[in-house]
Image (tube, grey):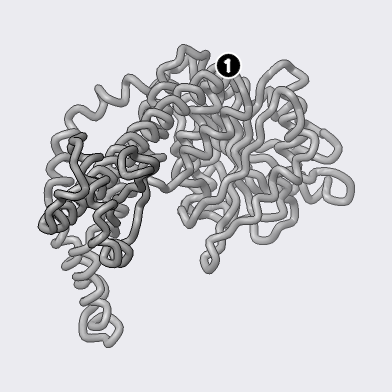
């Protein structure tokens, strides 16, 4: 594109046009356009009668130069807008994080919900903001909350028990948060997240916050960022946090490493009770509740309680100050819910008097730090293009049977830089000094 002007009576500039190169070719011999262009550029009074022909080339060159300058200006402006937008975006994220922190500190449930969504996000910029948010929340001066994990097989009545038990705690003056973890589909990655629907009364109570979250393929019954979600709920002023696991069997033990008390729900007459003797979930339970102990199941519940109590005698308690208890209860009728709470209070009282509570919190932070190290290493391993290409090249040998999976895995790991392991070895001596800041 080049610029040209119209004249009024050959003396005064009337208006400026933008014409195409083809139009310029057709009008390049028009002395009026050449004259007006030169007059516009140089502000010189020229006579149209003495305008040499070679000025056409000069005007063309000047117009070409102006066009290039215009394109350069547009490109620079675009870069400036992009940089400014990026800066504003970073500033917006920082402002948003500060707003979330203030909202969470003031107990705003909407801010808490957005904060947990930020924690659960897999975007790298969101993860960076989430880590800063959690770091700010963990430094708040709050009374120590009770972290209680609940697990059990599907159909045992976990959601019903949590709702009735949570409403009882709210009536006592407590603020209760419920983090319910739902299994994610291994095929589609989706999750139903129906726990909040089943807790109709608790989910709308003023003193409660119910948050269903997908486990996103994480093993152990909880999601990867459940501990961060617990920290956010504590920062929001909830003094009791109930963590409901996926509940699919004896592998749901990871929740025991993030809570202060681990509760196992069983139902009467559920089959071979000797399964409870197996090393796994039973030996981690601090309290075992035989749920649905009402109506026709009241007598089977008593029998189940006796069998479980006998099985616990064969196990070594994991707390020095506490031996696991077995209590019958019914979430439907409310039978023995007060006794369940009394048992929980006794457990935390003994845990505090013995000093085990402090060490337990430090141990939780330590274990989850190393789990997060493992998750981050795997994530960065998957993002590394050279490692992914190398792993892809080994897949055909593994599929064809020419290379054992274990050998292939070892070769893939060898491709990873040893910087991460060296960094972990460097951090290990300082582990307890780091975790001591976060146990409270």
- Could you tell me residue 47's position as x and y percent? 19, 43
17 sits to left or right of 237: left
Q: Name the image quarter holding the N terminus.
A: bottom left
Residue drawn 83% across and 45% down?
298
Q: Kindly state the secondary structure of the residue where label 1 is placed.
A: loop
Instruction: Report the label total.
Output: 1
43 sits to left or right of 100: left
**Label 1, residues with CA under 10 Å away: few <14, some 14-19, many ≥20:** some
The residue that disc 1 covers is 106
- Could you tell me residue 76's position as x and y percent? 24, 42
Residue drawn 63% across and 49% down?
152
Query: Could you say which is closer to the camera, residue 301 or residue 379?
Result: 379
Q: Name the image quarter holding the C terminus.
A: top left
- Could you tell me residue 190's position as x and y percent? 58, 59
Query: Could you say which is closer to the camera, residue 160 or residue 190?
Result: 190
Residue 130 lies in what quarter of the image?
Answer: top left
Query: Could you say which is closer to the camera, residue 46 or residue 62?
Result: 46
Residue drawn 14% across and 61% down?
414
Residue drawn 57% across and 29% down?
112
Query: Could you say which is closer to the camera, residue 110 or residue 224?
Result: 110
Q: Do we see residue 370 in this rendering?
A: no
Image height check: is 229 above or below 315?
Answer: above
């Amino acid at each position: 594109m080049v610029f040209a002007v119209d004249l009024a009576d050959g003396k005064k500039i009337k208006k400026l046009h933008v014409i195409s190169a083809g139009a310029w070719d057709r009008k390049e011999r028009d002395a009026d356009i050449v004259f007006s262009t030169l007059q516009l550029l140089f502000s010189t009074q020229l006579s149209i009668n003495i305008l040499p022909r070679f000025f056409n080339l000069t005007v063309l060159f000047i117009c070409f130069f102006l066009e290039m300058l215009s394109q350069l200006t547009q490109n620079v402006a675009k870069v400036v807008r992009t940089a400014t937008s990026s800066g504003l975006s970073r500033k917006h994220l920082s402002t948003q994080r500060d707003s979330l922190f203030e909202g969470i500190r003031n107990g705003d449930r909407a801010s808490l919900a957005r904060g947990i969504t930020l924690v659960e996000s897999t975007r790298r910029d969101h993860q960076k903001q989430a880590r800063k948010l959690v770091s700010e929340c963990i430094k708040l001066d709050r009374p120590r909350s009770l972290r209680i994990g609940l697990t059990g097989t599907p159909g045992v009545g976990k959601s019903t028990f949590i709702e009735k038990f949570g409403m009882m705690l709210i009536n006592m003056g407590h603020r209760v948060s419920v983090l319910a973890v739902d299994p994610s589909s291994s095929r589609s990655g989706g999750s139903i997240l129906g726990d909040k629907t089943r807790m109709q009364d608790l989910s709308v109570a003023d003193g409660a916050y119910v948050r269903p979250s997908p486990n996103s393929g994480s093993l152990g019954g909880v999601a990867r960022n459940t501990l961060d979600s617990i920290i956010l709920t504590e920062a929001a002023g909830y003094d009791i946090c109930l963590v409901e696991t996926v509940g699919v069997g004896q592998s749901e033990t990871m929740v025991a490493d993030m809570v202060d008390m681990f509760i196992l729900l069983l139902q009467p007459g559920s089959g071979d009770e000797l399964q409870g003797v197996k090393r796994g979930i039973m030996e981690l339970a601090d309290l075992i509740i035989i749920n649905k102990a009402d109506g026709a199941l009241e007598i089977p519940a008593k029998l189940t309680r006796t069998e479980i109590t006998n099985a616990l005698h064969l196990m070594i308690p994991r707390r020095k100050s506490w031996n696991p208890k077995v209590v019958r209860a019914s979430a439907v009728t409310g039978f023995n819910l007060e006794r369940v709470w009394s048992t929980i209070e006794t457990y935390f009282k003994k845990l505090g008097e013995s000093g085990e509570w402090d060490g337990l919190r430090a141990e939780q932070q330590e274990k989850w730090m190393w789990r997060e190290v493992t998750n981050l290493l795997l994530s960065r391993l998957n993002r590394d293009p050279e490692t992914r290409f190398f792993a892809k090249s080994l897949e055909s040998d593994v599929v064809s049977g020419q290379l054992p999976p274990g050998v292939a895995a070892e070769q893939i790991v060898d491709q990873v830089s040893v910087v991460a392991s060296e960094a972990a070895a460097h951090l290990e001596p300082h582990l307890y000094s780091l975790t001591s800041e976060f146990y409270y």
